[in-house]
C-alpha cells in the first residue's frame, strides 16, 4: 500500500494565526489612532487658547494698558491725591522656566528681609488670567533697577515696568478722610472684572478711595505688539486706549483740615466741621494719623506691627468709628424733644436742689453743681448745663419717646452719604436692651440717657451732622465728602436723606438757640471765657463724657487719675446764629471738661471759616490749652 505524503503546513492553523494577529494589529492601530486623535483634540480644542498664545509668543503679544487713576482735589482745587511715576517689578509665570528658582534668585538679588519673603512669593501667584503679569514689588530703587537690568538675561518672564503710583502729599493729615489704595489681594481678584482691571495692580482700600473706586479707576485698554524671540517690542500693531478715571473734587477745605490737625496737636481726638446749608464736610480729622503712602507700595511687617501695637490707635478713625457718650452736648436736642412732645414749654421751670430723685427711690442723681442752680427754665438749663432739668425731662419723656426723638436727629444711624465704614454707634432703646442683655429697661437708665451717659454712644460725625440739622432748624441735608465727580456735581437731594424735623411753633428754635448763645456769652455760660471777643453770634454746648462710672457718694478728681482714665472733652457749635455757615463737633480724649479744652478748638475752627482776614493763632490756642491742662493737674 503506497504511503501518504507528509503535510509541511497547516493552512487552517495558519489562517487562524493570521486572523488573530490581524485582529491584534487592527486593535493596536485603532487604540493608537484613538489616543492620537484624543490628544490632538485636547491640544486643539481644550488647550487652544494656551497654544495659540504660545505659538505667537515670539511674534505677537497683547498687552493690557492700565488706566490713569483719577486725581483728588479739595473744594478749592488743592491737590490731595496725585499719581507719580515709579518702576514696578512684574512677573509672567508662563514665560518663566523655573518659578521657584527665579523667585529665590530675585530674593537674593533684591536683598529682601526674611519677614517679606513669604509675601513676595505669594504675590507671584496672584493673577487674573494666563499671561497676566503679577506685581512683585512697587517703587523700585535705582540700585534695584540696576541689579535687575544687569541680570536681565537670567530672568525670562521678569520685567521692570514704568507706571503711575498713588501719592498723598499730606498723608498724615488726610489719611482718615481720603483713605488709601493698595495692592489687589487674592480675595479682591475673585470679585473684580478681569477686563476692567487688566494690568491694574492697585485698588482703593479705605475712605473715598474705596467708595469711589469705580469712578476713580477708569477702564483698561489693550495694545497688540510684535516682539522678537527675546520679548523685545519691535512695533505696535494696534491699540485701544484706556479710559482714565474721573477726577474727584471733595468738599474738604485743605486749610481748615490742616488747622484742625494742628489744633489737636497730637492729642487723641477728632474734629468734624460741616456746612449746614449743603451738608459739605469741610474738615474731618482723626488724631493721631498715619502715613498712608506706606500702604500704597506695601507696608513692611515691622511698621505695620508698630501701628497696630500703638496704644494711641493711629489706624482707628475716631471721627466716624469712635464711640463716645455725648454728655451734655445733647441737651439742646433733648430740650427740643420736650417741646415737640409737649411735656415742657420754654417758660416751664423746675427747682434744682443739686440732685433729682425718682419717686419712691432714695438714690440721688446729682447735678454737676452740688448745691444746685435754683429755678431753671429751658434757656438757663442749656446755658448752665443743668443736669437736674434733664433728669426730670428724661423721666417725663420715657425711653421710648427719647429714642424716637433722638433718632430723628440721626443718632444711632449711619447718616453720611459716602463716608466708608461709618459706624452707627448706639441710640439705646427698650428693645435693644432686651435683645442685647435679656433684661428690662429701668427708669434710672432713662435718667442717664437724659444727660448723655449710660448706654448712649455717638460718633463725632453724628454729633456734627445733628448740630448742622439743628442749625438748619430741622432741615436735613445729608453729610457728604464728594462735591464733584468729574465735572458732575452731586445732586442737592441725596438718597435716603432723613425726614425734616418740624416744630408746631417755629419760635422754639430761637428759644433753644438763645440758650446755646448764652453758653458762649451769657454771665453763667459754661463756655463764656471761650466766647470772649466774638465778632459774630455763636451757639454752642459743652459736654463731658465719663470714661468710667462713679459710685453714689464718689466725687471725680482728675488729679488722682491716670491720664487715660480722665473724662473726655466734647463741644458742639454752629455760627453765625442768624445764618449758620459752619457746624462743628470736637472731642478730645481724656482732656477733662468740654467747656474749656474742646470749646477753644471749636472757636478756632469757626473763626478760621468765618473771619477771612483773621487766621487763628495756633500757638496762642495751645498756650491756653496748656494752662487748662495745668489747672486740671492741680
Image: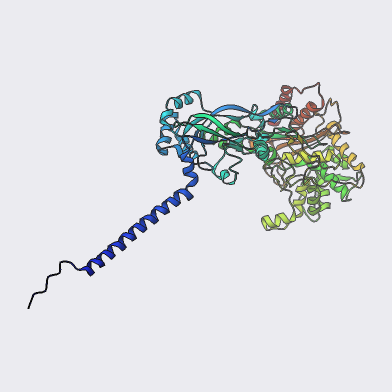
- Front residue of 616 and 362: 616
- The x and y percentages for residue 352 are 84, 44
| Residue at far left of view | 1
Q: How many marks?
A: 0
Q: How is the image coloured?
A: rainbow
- Front residue of 197 and 51: 51
Q: Is residue 324 visible?
A: yes
- The answer to which image quadrant residue 537 occupies is top right
402 relative position to 90: left or right: right
**Which quarter shows the N terminus?**
bottom left
- The x and y percentages for residue 584 are 77, 34
- The answer to which image quadrant residue 99 occupies is top left
Residue lying at 45% horizontally and 25% vertically, measured from the top left: 149
| Residue at far front of view | 2
| Residue at far top of view | 613
- The x and y percentages for residue 6 are 12, 70
45 relative position to 29: left or right: right
Residue lying at 89% horizontally and 45% vertically, measured from the top left: 349
Residue lying at 60% horizontally and 27% vertically, measured from the top left: 84
- The x and y percentages for residue 578 are 89, 33
Q: Is residue 311 visible?
A: no
| Residue at far bottom of view | 1
Q: Tell me: residue 593, above or below residue 363.
A: above
**Which quarter shows the C terminus?**
top right
Amino acid at each position: 500500500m503506497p504511503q501518504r505524503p507528509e503535510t509541511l503546513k497547516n493552512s487552517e492553523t495558519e489562517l487562524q494565526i493570521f486572523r488573530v494577529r490581524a485582529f491584534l494589529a487592527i486593535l493596536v492601530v485603532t487604540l493608537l489612532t484613538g489616543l492620537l486623535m484624543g490628544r490632538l483634540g485636547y491640544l486643539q480644542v481644550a488647550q487652544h487658547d494656551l497654544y495659540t498664545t504660545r505659538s505667537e509668543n515670539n511674534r505677537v503679544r497683547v498687552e493690557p494698558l492700565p488706566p490713569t487713576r483719577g486725581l483728588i482735589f479739595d473744594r478749592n482745587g488743592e491737590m490731595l491725591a496725585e499719581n507719580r511715576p515709579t518702576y514696578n517689578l512684574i512677573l509672567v509665570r508662563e514665560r518663566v522656566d523655573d518659578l521657584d528658582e527665579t523667585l529665590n534668585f530675585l530674593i537674593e538679588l533684591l536683598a529682601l528681609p526674611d519677614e517679606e519673603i513669604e509675601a513676595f512669593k505669594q504675590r507671584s501667584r496672584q493673577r487674573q488670567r494666563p499671561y497676566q503679569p503679577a506685581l512683585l514689588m512697587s517703587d523700585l530703587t535705582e540700585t534695584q533697577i540696576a541689579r535687575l537690568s544687569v541680570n536681565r538675561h537670567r530672568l525670562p518672564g521678569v520685567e521692570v515696568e514704568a507706571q503711575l503710583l498713588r501719592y498723598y502729599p499730606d498723608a498724615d493729615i488726610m489719611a482718615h478722610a481720603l483713605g488709601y489704595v493698595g495692592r489687589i489681594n487674592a480675595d479682591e481678584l475673585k470679585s473684580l472684572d478681569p477686563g476692567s482691571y487688566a494690568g491694574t495692580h492697585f485698588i482703593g482700600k479705605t475712605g473715598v478711595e474705596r467708595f469711589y473706586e469705580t469712578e476713580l479707576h477708569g477702564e483698561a485698554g489693550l495694545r497688540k505688539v510684535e516682539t522678537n524671540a527675546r520679548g523685545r517690542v519691535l512695533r505696535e500693531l494696534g491699540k485701544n486706549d484706556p479710559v482714565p478715571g474721573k477726577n474727584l473734587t471733595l468738599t474738604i477745605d485743605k486749610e481748615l483740615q490742616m488747622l484742625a490737625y494742628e489744633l489737636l496737636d497730637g492729642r487723641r481726638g477728632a474734629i468734624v466741621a460741616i456746612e449746614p446749608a449743603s451738608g459739605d464736610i469741610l474738615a474731618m480729622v482723626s488724631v493721631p494719623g498715619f502715613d498712608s503712602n506706606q500702604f500704597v507700595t506695601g507696608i513692611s511687617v515691622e511698621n505695620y506691627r508698630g501701628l497696630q501695637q500703638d496704644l494711641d490707635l493711629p489706624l482707628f478713625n475716631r471721627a466716624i468709628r469712635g464711640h463716645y457718650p455725648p454728655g451734655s452736648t445733647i441737651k439742646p436736642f433733648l430740650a427740643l424733644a420736650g417741646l415737640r412732645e409737649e411735656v415742657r414749654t420754654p417758660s416751664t421751670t423746675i427747682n434744682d436742689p443739686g440732685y433729682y430723685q425718682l419717686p419712691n427711690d432714695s438714690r440721688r442723681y446729682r447735678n454737676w453743681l452740688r448745691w444746685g442752680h435754683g429755678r431753671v427754665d429751658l434757656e438757663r438749663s442749656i446755658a448752665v448745663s443743668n443736669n437736674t432739668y434733664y433728669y426730670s425731662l428724661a423721666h417725663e419723656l420715657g425711653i421710648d419717646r427719647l429714642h424716637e426723638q433722638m433718632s430723628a436727629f440721626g443718632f444711632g444711624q449711619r447718616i453720611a452719604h459716602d463716608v466708608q465704614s461709618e459706624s452707627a454707634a448706639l441710640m439705646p432703646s427698650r428693645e435693644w436692651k432686651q435683645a442685647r442683655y435679656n433684661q428690662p429697661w429701668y427708669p434710672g437708665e432713662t435718667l442717664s440717657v437724659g444727660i448723655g451717659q449710660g448706654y448712649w454712644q455717638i460718633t463725632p460725625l453724628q454729633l456734627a451732622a445733628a448740630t448742622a440739622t439743628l442749625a438748619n432748624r430741622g432741615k436735613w441735608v445729608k453729610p457728604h465728602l464728594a462735591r464733584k465727580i468729574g465735572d458732575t456735581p452731586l445732586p442737592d437731594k441725596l438718597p435716603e436723606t432723613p425726614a425734616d424735623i418740624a416744630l408746631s411753633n417755629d419760635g422754639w428754635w430761637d428759644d433753644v438757640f438763645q440758650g446755646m448763645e448764652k453758653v458762649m456769652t451769657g454771665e453763667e455760660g459754661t463756655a463764656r471765657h471761650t466766647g470772649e471777643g466774638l465778632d459774630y453770634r455763636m451757639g454752642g454746648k459743652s459736654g463731658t463724657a465719663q470714661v468710667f462710672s462713679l459710685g453714689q457718694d464718689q466725687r471725680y478728681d482728675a488729679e488722682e487719675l491716670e491720664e487715660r482714665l480722665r473724662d473726655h472733652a466734647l463741644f458742639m457749635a454752629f455760627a453765625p446764629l442768624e445764618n449758620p455757615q459752619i457746624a462743628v463737633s470736637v472731642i478730645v480724649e481724656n482732656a477733662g471738661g468740654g467747656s474749656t479744652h474742646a470749646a477753644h478748638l471749636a472757636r478756632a475752627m469757626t473763626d478760621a471759616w468765618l473771619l477771612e482776614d483773621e487766621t487763628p493763632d495756633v500757638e496762642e490756642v495751645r498756650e491756653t490749652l496748656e494752662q487748662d491742662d495745668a489747672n486740671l493737674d492741680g
